[in-house]
Image (tube, rainbow, N blue to C red):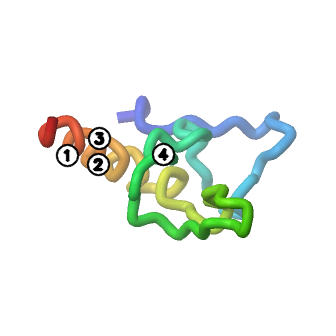
Amino acid sequence: MKFKRFEHKECEYYPCHNLDDMNCLFCFCPLYFTECNGDFIITKKGVKDCSNCTKPHDESGYDYIMQEIKKRNSKK
């Protein structure tokens, strides 16, 4: 199941969330524009700041993201 992980150690922003073992597959989270249950804040300018969220980057991130996408698609 290696398709669930990708680590881009040469990225100029790596590690962006200060994790020892980081999955970069969802560098830009597909749930960014949704209510995602992640650890985010809305800034004073109204921007969603996900810098404290590690859900897409941790060990279970792939499964979590795919589960959330499937849930949203089944509601359509």
Numbered-mark total = 4
Mark 2 crowdedness (10 Å alpha carbons): few <14, some 14-19, many ≥20: some
* Labelled pair 1, 3 in contact (Cβ < 8 Å): yes
- Residue 47 is situated, as x and y percent measured from the top left of the image, at 66, 56
- Residue 74 is situated, as x and y percent measured from the top left of the image, at 13, 38
Question: Looking at the rendered structure, which numbered label has been put on residue 68?
Answer: 2
Which badge, 2 or 4, comes first in the chain's sequence? 4
Q: CA distance from mark 1 to mark 4?
A: 15 Å
Q: Secondary structure at mark 3?
A: helix
* Labelled pair 1, 2 in contact (Cβ < 8 Å): yes
Q: Which residue is mark 4?
A: 33
Q: Which residue is mark 1?
A: 71
Amino acid bearing label 4: Phe
Q: Which residue is mark 3?
A: 69
* Labelled pair 3, 2 in contact (Cβ < 8 Å): yes
Corner quadrant of residue 25? top right
Q: Among all residues in the image, which is located at the extreme top?
A: 3
* Labelled pair 1, 4 in contact (Cβ < 8 Å): no
Amino acid bearing label 2: Glu
Mark 4 crowdedness (10 Å alpha carbons): few <14, some 14-19, many ≥20: few
Q: CA distance from mark 4 to mark 3?
A: 12 Å
Amino acid bearing label 3: Ile
Q: Secondary structure at mark 4?
A: loop
Q: Secondary structure at mark 2?
A: helix
